[in-house]
């Protein structure tokens, strides 16, 4: 059981009021927010509006702070037992068209971490592309580079292939993953993939004009690498440097100063020892993972914890104070990457 699962279980049984003073500051993140989703197998990153509103209602008793308060929060976590940071990853267009108004209504500041290569272009998130392949490519046998032979016969075989295939793909060096993804794209008839992508407007990224509009509304813009791909140990040092420094340079040119980073995927297997050093050397002041934990003294500021909000959260107010249960694991991992 992961720390997040454990805290969720315990949170069901403890009243929020009992934990009000036990808390530590934390960061929470989501991706996109959609009026409704049509295929949960490929639109895995989006909250539906009603569920998102329910989450924000659960957070109204907390102090939601702008990310500029991070230095004070890390220096004095004991003064911030009810402080939270709210973040969105990737840069989906629906953060502007849907989420921003809801967050304004709740008067909650938030930050947006964008993958700069995807902003303002037509390049979909690679995992979304892979999911389209696994669930929508014509039935048959596929021999793709760097993956075992795949056979799509039923929904069951597709689901099984998707789970193991995406896991394999994710741990490839970026150049090899690129070859596999290219072959996946080729498996569709001309024009078929483009019309399929059109059916999922949730996966559209913002344009730079739209990122600037969010920035003018008070949203802090951070970097989520150039390409939405993990920064693990199979990646070359040069590629990691480009992911960190290139994304910051692009945001600074398009929007303005950028000092915050969030790792794509962001779990222990997605971040190698060279990754956080590349982020540090690119001039960021703080970077966020997707490991559960609270924001406390002594953490490596380039490997800070964050809790990923699930599509529906039923006991969030009780769960948040329990996130510090993940700190031991986080600290051990930080030490291993030092
Ligand atoms: Zn992401």
Image: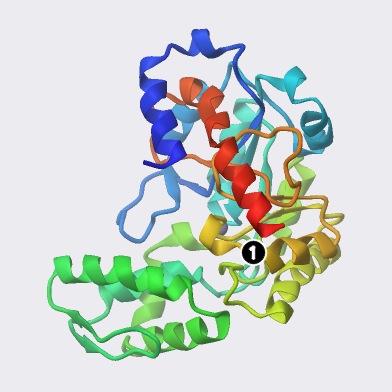
Q: Is residue 236 above or below residue 286?
A: below
Q: Quadrant of ligand 1?
A: bottom right
Report which quarter residue 231 is drawn in: bottom right
Whether the residue carrying mark 1 lies under 8 Å from ligand 1 is answered with yes
Q: Residue at x 53, y 51 (%)?
A: 94
Up-down relation of residue 70 to residue 113 (above or below): above
Q: How did the renderer colour the structure? A: rainbow
Describe the element under mark 1 as helix, strand or loop. Answer: loop
The residue identified by callout 1 is 115
Q: Residue furthest left?
A: 154
In percent of width and height, residue 79 lies at: 76, 18
Above or below residue 311? Residue 200 is: below
Label 1: few (<14), some or many (≥20) within 10 Å? Answer: many
Q: Residue 202 location in percent, x, y?
A: 46, 57
Residue 241's spot in the image, x, y percent?
Answer: 75, 73
Identity of the residue drawn at 39% across and 37% down: 5
In terms of depth relative to the viewer, which is nearer, 22 or 197?
A: 22
Q: Is residue 95 above or below residue 314?
A: below
Name the image quarter holding the C terminus: bottom right
> In the depicted view, which residue is nearer to us: 20 or 104?
20
134 displayed left or right of 76 = left
């Amino acid at each position: 059981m992961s720390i997040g699962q454990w805290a969720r279980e315990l949170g069901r049984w403890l009243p929020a009021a009992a934990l009000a003073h036990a808390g530590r500051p934390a960061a929470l993140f989501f991706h996109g927010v959609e009026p409704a989703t049509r295929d949960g197998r490929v639109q895995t990153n989006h909250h539906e509006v009603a569920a998102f509103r329910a989450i924000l209602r659960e957070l109204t008793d907390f102090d939601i702070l702008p990310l500029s308060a991070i230095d004070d929060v890390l220096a004095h976590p004991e003064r911030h037992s009810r402080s939270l940071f709210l973040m969105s990853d990737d840069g989906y267009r629906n953060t502007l068209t849907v989420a921003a108004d809801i967050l304004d209504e709740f008067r909650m500041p938030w930050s947006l971490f964008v993958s700069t290569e995807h902003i303002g272009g037509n390049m979909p998130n690679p995992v979304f592309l892979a999911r389209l392949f696994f669930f929508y490519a014509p039935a048959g046998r596929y021999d793709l580079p760097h993956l075992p032979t795949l056979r799509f016969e039923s929904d069951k075989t597709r689901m099984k292939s998707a789970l193991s295939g995406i896991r394999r793909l994710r741990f490839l060096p970026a150049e090899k993953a690129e070859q596999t993804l290219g072959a996946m794209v080729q498996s569709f008839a001309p024009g078929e993939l483009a019309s399929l992508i059109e059916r999922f407007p949730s996966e559209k990224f913002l344009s730079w004009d739209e990122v600037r509009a969010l920035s003018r509304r008070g949203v802090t813009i951070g970097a989520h690498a150039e390409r939405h791909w993990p920064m693990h140990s199979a990646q070359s040092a040069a590629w990691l440097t480009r992911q960190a420094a290139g994304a910051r340079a692009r945001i600074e040119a398009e929007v303005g100063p950028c000092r915050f980073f969030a790792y794509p995927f962001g779990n222990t297997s997605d971040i190698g020892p060279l990754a956080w050093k590349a982020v540090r050397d690119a001039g960021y002041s703080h970077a966020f993972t997707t490991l559960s934990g609270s924001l406390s003294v002594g953490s490596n500021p380039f490997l800070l914890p964050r809790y990923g909000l699930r599509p529906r959260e039923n006991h969030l107010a009780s769960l948040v104070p329990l996130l510090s249960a993940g700190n031991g694991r986080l600290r051990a991992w930080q030490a291993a990457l030092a």
